[in-house]
Image (cartoon, grey):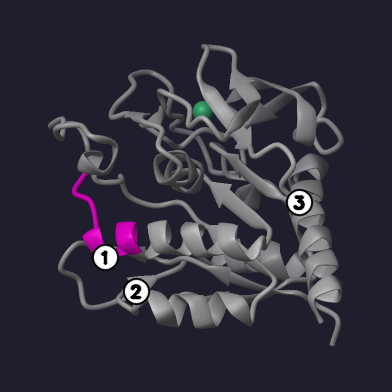
C-alpha cells in the first residue's frame, strides 16, 4: 500500500465528551489518494508524537475559535467559546509535526492555528466577509502567489465561512493568498516541504473546482514523497 497516512484533527466543544469530523474533509482526502485517520481529543503529547511518527502528514481542519489568550489577548464577546482540549492538541501536533518535518495542511481554523502556534495573532471578529450561500459556491476573490501559484489561478474565487482571520503574521510564515478586501487567506513556511494553510474550504469545492482538487493532490504528493523518503 503506497497511500500516505494523514492525521486529521477533529472538532470539539468545550466540556463535551465527544469529538467529530466533517465528512467532507475525509472524502477530499480519499479522493486525493490519502488514508485519513483521526487524532483523538484529550490524548497526551507523547501519544500525539507516537501517532504522528507513524504518519505521513497532518491536516488541521476547520472549527470553532481559538482561545485568544494563546495569542495574548482578552476574549472579545464576538469570539466563540474555545475548546481548550482542541487548542492544546493542535498546538502540540504542530510543534511535533515541525520537529518531524511532515507535510501539514491547514484549512480555515487550521490556518489560524498555524499562525497562533508560530507566534502570530488573529482578528477576533470581522464583519461582512462571511458568505451565506452554499458551501461549494465561491464568494470572493483571492490573489495567490508563491506555493499556490501552480495550484490556483493568479486570481481565484473561493468560498468564505470565517469570522476570524490572521492579524499579525508569525515571523516564520509568508503570505501566499490575499482576499480582495485585504485579509491574509493563505500562508506557508518557505523552505518547508509542505506547510500550507488556506482560509477557505477547498474540501467543499472539490466537485466543482479543479484547483481545490489540485491542492489536495499536491498535499497527497508531498505526503507520499515524505513516506518514501522516511521508509
Ligand atoms: Mn474569506
Label 3 to label 2, Cα distance in Å? Answer: 27 Å
Q: Position of residue 23 (x, y in %)?
A: 54, 67
User: Residue 98 versus residue 103: which sits nearer the camera?
Assistant: 98
Label 1 to label 2, Cα distance in Å? Answer: 7 Å
Q: Residues within 10 Å of mark 3 (few under 14, many from 20)?
A: some
Q: Which image quadrant is residue 53 in?
A: bottom right
Q: Which residue is mark 3?
A: 193
User: Residue 19 versus residue 194: which sits nearer the camera?
Assistant: 194
Image position of 49 (left or right of 91): right
Nearer the observer: mark 1 or 3; the answer is 3
Q: Which residues are magenta?
A: 80-88
| Pointer 3 residue Cβ closer than 8 Å to ligand 1 | no
> Which of the labelled discs sits on residue 41, or is there none?
2
Q: Earlier in the sequence, mark 3 or mark 2?
A: 2
Residue 84 within the magenta-colored segment of the rendering: yes
The tally of labels here is: 3
User: Residue 199 versus residue 97: which sits nearer the camera?
Assistant: 97
Residue 81 within the magenta-colored segment of the rendering: yes
Q: Which residue is mark 1?
A: 85
Image position of 127 (left or right of 100): left
Say which element carries label 3: loop
- Residue farthest to the bottom? 1
Nearer the observer: mark 3 or 2; the answer is 3
Q: Which image quadrant is residue 11 in?
A: bottom left
Say which element carries label 2: loop
- Residue contact between numbered discs 1 and 2, judged by CB atoms under 8 Å: yes
Q: Residue at x 23, y 51 (%)?
A: 82
In the image, residue 17 above or below residue 81: below
Q: Earlier in the sequence, mark 1 or mark 2?
A: 2
User: Residue 74 versus residue 185: which sits nearer the camera?
Assistant: 74
Q: Residue at x 34, y 74 (%)?
A: 41
Amino acid at each position: 500500500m503506497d497511500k500516505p497516512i494523514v492525521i486529521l484533527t477533529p472538532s470539539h466543544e468545550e466540556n463535551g465528551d465527544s469529538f467529530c469530523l466533517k465528512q467532507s474533509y475525509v472524502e477530499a482526502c480519499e479522493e486525493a489518494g490519502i488514508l485519513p485517520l483521526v487524532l483523538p481529543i484529550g490524548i497526551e503529547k507523547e501519544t500525539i508524537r507516537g501517532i504522528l511518527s507513524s504518519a505521513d502528514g497532518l491536516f488541521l481542519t476547520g472549527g470553532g475559535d481559538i482561545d485568544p489568550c494563546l495569542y495574548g489577548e482578552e476574549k472579545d464577546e464576538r469570539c466563540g467559546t474555545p475548546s481548550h482540549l482542541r487548542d492544546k492538541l493542535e498546538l502540540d501536533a504542530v510543534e511535533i509535526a515541525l520537529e518531524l518535518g511532515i507535510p501539514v495542511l491547514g484549512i480555515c481554523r487550521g490556518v489560524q492555528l498555524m499562525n497562533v502556534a508560530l507566534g502570530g495573532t488573529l482578528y477576533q471578529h470581522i464583519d461582512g466577509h462571511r458568505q451565506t450561500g452554499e458551501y461549494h459556491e465561491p464568494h470572493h476573490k483571492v490573489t495567490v502567489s508563491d506555493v499556490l501559484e501552480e495550484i490556483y489561478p493568479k486570481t481565484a474565487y473561493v468560498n468564505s465561512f470565517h469570522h476570524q482571520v490572521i492579524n499579525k503574521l508569525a515571523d516564520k510564515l509568508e503570505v501566499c493568498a490575499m482576499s480582495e478586501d485585504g485579509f491574509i487567506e493563505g500562508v506557508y513556511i518557505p523552505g518547508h516541504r509542505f506547510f500550507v494553510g488556506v482560509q477557505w474550504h477547498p474540501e467543499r469545492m472539490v466537485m466543482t473546482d479543479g484547483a481545490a482538487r489540485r491542492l489536495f493532490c499536491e498535499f497527497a504528493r508531498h505526503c507520499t514523497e515524505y513516506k518514501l523518503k522516511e521508509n
